[in-house]
Image: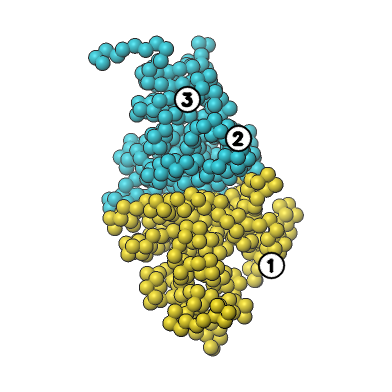
Chain colours: A cyan, B yellow
Amino acid sequence: MALGGNAILQSHQRGTAAEQQANVAATAAQIGELIETGWEVVITHGNGPQVGNILIQNEEAAGIVPPMPLDACGGQSQGLLGYFLQQALGNELRARGIRCQVGAMITQVIVAADDPAFVSPTKPIGPFFTRERAERLKEERGYVVAEVGSRGWRRVVPSPDPKAIVERDIILGLVQAGVVVVAAGGGGVPVIAGPGGGYRGVEAVIDKDLAGQQLARDVKATHFLILTDVERVMLDYGRPSQRPLDRLTVREAREHLAAGQFPPGSMGPKVEAAVRFVEAGGELCAITSLDKAVDALRGMAGTRVMAEENTDRREEPGL
Amino acid sequence: MALGGNAILQSHQRGTAAEQQANVAATAAQIGELIETGWEVVITHGNGPQVGNILIQNEEAAGIVPPMPLDACGGQSQGLLGYFLQQALGNELRARGIRCQVGAMITQVIVAADDPAFVSPTKPIGPFFTRERAERLKEERGYVVAEVGSRGWRRVVPSPDPKAIVERDIILGLVQAGVVVVAAGGGGVPVIAGPGGGYRGVEAVIDKDLAGQQLARDVKATHFLILTDVERVMLDYGRPSQRPLDRLTVREAREHLAAGQFPPGSMGPKVEAAVRFVEAGGELCAITSLDKAVDALRGMAGTRVMAEENTDRREEPGL
């Protein structure tokens, strides 16, 4: 399952540890219910607000402490949120009398050095700057900056496509041993293969749902849950004809994606992630809210993405 | 093996990511040599300068971003250094043609809620403050502060004794599966058991060598390497009679510890960690510098702590 940002921090909150840990405890209770029902669970999560705060802290202390590059900040956020989740989930499972270990793994995710995203960075991260400050950071640190809405300028970074998880075999081994694994947090730390075959971090952000589908495939998951702040995917979102979707075949999903039904920075990657998971052989991907996760797996909530419409099975031409 | 701070950051360096990653690459080369020689390796590491920098960043941005408590900062530092080590070691092993996975685990270490250290915090952490600022932090956040040398005031926190590693079974499973594990970074995130049986973080710092001996025992290590910035432990350190030690029996080590031969914040916990490891059945603990690690395991360098002096075996009275 890929936990959305709201599973850890609500948008109206400032982001204290107490707030985040209370949210994570509530999230852990939901996950505990799933596990008690018999599901084996592997978890990934977003890190937007947390890495955003780490970047602000880096900027504010830049005169005293060397700022860390984005890949290192991503590692930090994995440590922070891995700790929160590991502790809360462990406590939840112990309280339920479930003898099951929880382990958070630092995770590197490989991206292609020639991913087109590196040519045109689009993902805004970190603090807002004045135009002057943005220009200076562009010169001094080589940042790509862009005016974002009315609040000012921000750094924008590439959002390349995840290709593979470096720690895949370890994670799979843990899952097979019955461990509840937290991995690929924040989409994973993006790395590219160097000339000598080694990996090195790059300043980029991988979409956590796209990384999540890679993780789900790598651990041979049958089901993939994308948990967000809405119960269902909408067609014609924001228009009078807006309507929620109960089910989507991958074919329908691809058509809607091509028609621009789902916005790039938000529902788009979720539907794309769902489609990739099912196309790679996954049984079902459900996009829904955290509190509907159990119902969605029972077919009673969420938008369920499957290879074909079960109740209306048609033969494909040529098959 | 417990890596000392200098394996990641030299004391004259500012602490940029590039500096740390270059040091870690050199460290990884040494560890790679050990692994190529046939040793199975589990790694822990200090986090002093890194968590210190994170604390400074938290303070500098405190007006904008809620500062994280020390346990959460510890988790962050595990993510940061786990990422650096995991990447560098993975690259090193691939370059040597060794097919071996490297995995960094977020680790919680249990301490006793009634550990005497909580009554008298002694471990200085984070930035230096003026007396006024220190007084304010004492009032506003309940910090315990102390004047440290001539540079000003610092926060001091308890340094409780590690009792057990929450993720022990996972780490042991990974080691048995042949994974090179990085765990219990910075001594682990200290947690205490709550009334309901769950764990919660505490604002404290566990000595990384003491946590390291717990880790070594938990993974059933035969040998424990404590790597620091000197090649051997000294007797009468700083006096004219100062001399390096090649070997120490646990009995001799206990006598020297009781006689105050090894300073509390520095060599003391290392010798204590060595003694505990050997007393718990470990074959050998070597305290030495990183570049002598291979030689120390061959008996050609470092201070080797063992149950008894092999070349001069005496019967214990009553045995």
Packing grade of label 3 (10 A; few <14, some 14-19, many >=20) is many
Q: Name the residue under label 3.
A: A286
Quarter-of-image position of residue B258: bottom right
The residue depicted at 50 percent of the width and 50 percent of the height is B169
Instruction: Please check whether the numbered discs 1 and 3 fall on a single chain.
Output: no
Amino acid type at image mark 2: Ala
Left or right, A318 with respect to A313, comes to left
> Residue A311, position in %: x, y?
42, 12
Amino acid type at image mark 3: Ala
- Residue furthest to the bottom in view is B240
Residue B221 appears anywhere in the view: yes
Gap in Å between the C-alphas at discs 3 and 2? 19 Å
Q: Is mark 1 on a helix, strand or loop?
A: strand
Amino acid type at image mark 1: Glu
The residue depicted at 54 percent of the width and 88 percent of the height is B240
> Residue B30, position in %: x, y?
37, 64
Task: For marks 1 and 3, give the one nearer the viewer.
Answer: 3
Task: For marks 1 and 2, give the one nearer the viewer.
Answer: 2
Tell which subunit mark 3 falls on: A
Figure check: B267 above or below A118: below
Q: Mark 2 points at which residue?
A: A29
> Residue A301, position in %: x, y?
53, 20
| B136 and B126: which is toward the camera | B126
Q: What element carries label 2?
A: helix
Packing grade of label 1 (10 A; few <14, some 14-19, many >=20) is some
Instruction: Of the two numbered discs 3 and 2 on the same chain, state the one appearing first in sequence.
Output: 2
The residue depicted at 58 percent of the width and 79 percent of the height is B318
Q: Is mark 3 on a helix, strand or loop?
A: strand
Packing grade of label 2 (10 A; few <14, some 14-19, many >=20) is many
